[in-house]
Amino acid sequence: MQRLLIVSMLLLGLSACKDENTGPSTQGFDRGSMLAYYADQHIQPAFDSLSTAAQELHSRLLGLAAQPSPVQLGELRAAWIRAYLHWQTAAIYNVGPAAEQGLRKRMTEELGTFPVSEAKINNYLSAGDTSFANFDRDSRGLFAIEYLLFAGTDADALIRLAQTPARNYLLALSNRFRSETTRIASEWRGYRNEFVGNTATSAGSPTVQLYNEFLLSYEGLKNFKLGLPLGLRMGQTQAEPQKVEAFYSGQSLAGISSQMQALEAFWRGNNSTGFRAYLLASTGGEELVNRTEAQLRIIEARISACGTGRLDSLIATNPQPAIDLHTELQRNTRFFKSDMSSLLGLTITFSSGDGD
Amino acid sequence: MEVLRQAYRSLWLPAAPAPLATLRIVTGLVMLVGSLRFWAKGWIETNLLAAQMQFKYSGFEWVQMPPVGWMLYAVFGVMVLASLGVMLGYRYRLSAWLLWGSFTYIELLDLTWYLNHYYFISLLLLLLALLPAHRHLSLDVKWGRVQALASIPGWMVALPRWQMGILYVYAGLAKIQSDWLIYALPMRLWLPAHNHEPVLGPLFGWQYTPWLFSWAGMLYDCTIPFWLSWKKSRPWAYLTVIVFHALTGWLFQIGMFPVVMMAITLVFFDAAAHEKWHKRFFGIWALPRGIQLQAAKPWVWLMAGYLAFQLLFPWRFVLYPGNFFWTEAGYRFGWRVMLMEKAGTATFYITRADNGREGEVDNAAFLLPHQEKQMAMQPDLILQYAHLLAEHYQNQGIPVAKVRAEVYVTLQGKPSRLYFNPQLNLLTLSHRDFPSWLYPAP
């Protein structure tokens, strides 16, 4: 045995001499600082901003006159749009208090399901049922609020807001959105140390959860916010522009742009830490970082090329810029998915199992 | 030469049945713990029943999931009881065949769960079912169901040792290549992810550790059966077995495998050691007594054939062209463990036959994350998935003209490359053929 060890040490010495291109660090990448950076600079601020925006939306609704004015409606809608844009950042982080737990699904599903069902919303609304004790997630959340605030003409919306059933349902929706986002923001403060303290890389560890949620969010952007309305998904027989996210407010492209910016900011981190720095610290990471950055620039250009109008109109009249964006997002998927997980030794599966 | 001659002669001399009895007992025990563990972790549901599609082994496409879920639980129930039967040596032949059958059935259900060590356990259970491992230190003997044996032919004890030897040496030979030894891949990718571990953590962040692990792993695998066979080095070798497997078990997600190896390598100890342990655990009852077993000639030939197969089958990859990390032709069933970091991103597109419209498939709607991960980097699974998708949509009344896929694969952390022509209609290909349709390895 001793001989075996000596031989292996000798061979090790020989082989080590040959290699001149070893990793830059001697202690390895510090995942603890990365997690602290994400928790303090990205996740907590995102949930705080979202819950503040939700509070503001809700208090505006509470202060709404019996017969709202067009000015009030405008302010209310502006408050919704602010909440919607903050949502794009926070919804990347379905981790910890925002993760699935028991019957409660991930925050994105609980509060951000789209497209919503107008029929279901109107049923619950006329029945005065604000219990949310059902699994119709497409009858509540951010986009059910949007439906009641934006659907139809301004006059329609003003009439709706003057009616008790719609007002009550809207208030209940907004109250739930406010209370849930506030709960997550405050629980995250308590969860922060547990999150930062666990630097493992096994299935279910904070690093792996964070990475997997990032991936899900990215693929969701491509598949559901673009692929679905474009009619690119198997089983669809045509484009379905009305299935864009934020259909009633027409804010879809602003939402897509915000989400992509948030995903990119998350991936980049800062100069010393974050997933980009993590990649740079691993064998062969620099090439992947360069390829990813080049592709991200193309994606940014494609998003600009879609303009600032309504995504559903774009899809209905001239879908090519949206299809091109979808294609470029697809080209980047492998960089985020297989290449990144391989280099970092992170697992794409959520549950555990045996390997060999 | 004299050593070899002696070894050969000992194959035909009577040997004590004690090592075989230990092997039977520890195998039954680890199978009992393993099947209960699988059950307790909820994996019957999450890993098997939750899957909508299953990937099949070539030649075993007929192995199907049971029609209702409880039947799969029943199979695990059989496995638990049969493990007990094997461990105790109770109605041994029945127990051993049931254990082999139920375990192998579960393994054949879905190729995406293929593991070398599951294959090894299947082989070991088969050997145990064929050998008279129950005719010493068993309930069958104690209750007079079978006659006890005082001795068995030497080759019956040698056989499981050889099987283990093949596993180790082949696993070691597979590591003698430049990726593993010179570039320390994939250890260089995997170990830094463990720099957070207590005590040894800083070691995994050290830049030379991957080389240390790669070389030590290769030397361990190549030589450990010989150290275990030599009486003088055996205690140290077994200590190394424990340290090596404890370390890999702690670092990598390999479940029961380290325990299995620590338990099974006990078979390398000589009969005297086994008899000493038996006396300590089972008292006077452990004394070998009874008749001498002489094996019939056909059995000897059968076992020789089995060994020849085990020696040759892992080499079939040399018959195929190209980089077998890339093509995976002849990769499985060859004791190639931990050799590569490979991952893929696969997007499938289906063209309808009626209106010519092409749609993109959401893999997550059909596959478990684990299945998708495995499928996205293995050519035969990619083809199976294409056929399964076509079948699924055709059953829904949607005629399918073409299934194509854009697959990018990364090997050993190198930038991912297009795996094959994304315009290729995968329905025209069969998963049983060599994947000549792949682009060459990078």
Image: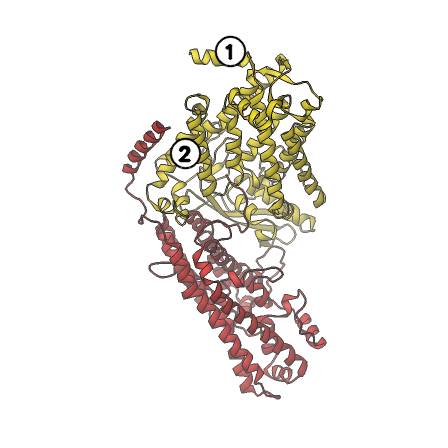
Chain colours: A red, B yellow
Decide which of tag 2 and tag 1 comes sooner along the chain: 1
Which residue is painted at 40% across and 41% down in the image?
B187
Which labelled disc corresponds to residue B9?
1
Residue A132 tag number: none
Residue at image coords 44%, 23%: B226
Classify residue A234 by image quadrant: bottom right
Residue A301 visible in this rendered orientation of the protein: no
How many numbered circles does the render carry?
Answer: 2
Q: Tell me which residue sits at (64%, 21%) in the image.
A: B135
- Residue B52 image position (x, y, % from top left): 64, 48
Subunit that carries the residue with mark 2: B
In this figure, which residue is indicated by the disc labeled 2? B217
Q: Give the chain letter at badge 1.
A: B
Query: Of B63 and B329, which appears nearest the observer?
Result: B63
- Mark yes or no: residue B149 visible: yes
Mark 2 surroundings: few (<14), some (14-19) or many (≥20) residues within 10 A: some
Asked if residue B233 is positioned above or below residue A330 in the image, the reply reads above
SS for callout 1: helix
Q: State the SS at label 2.
A: helix
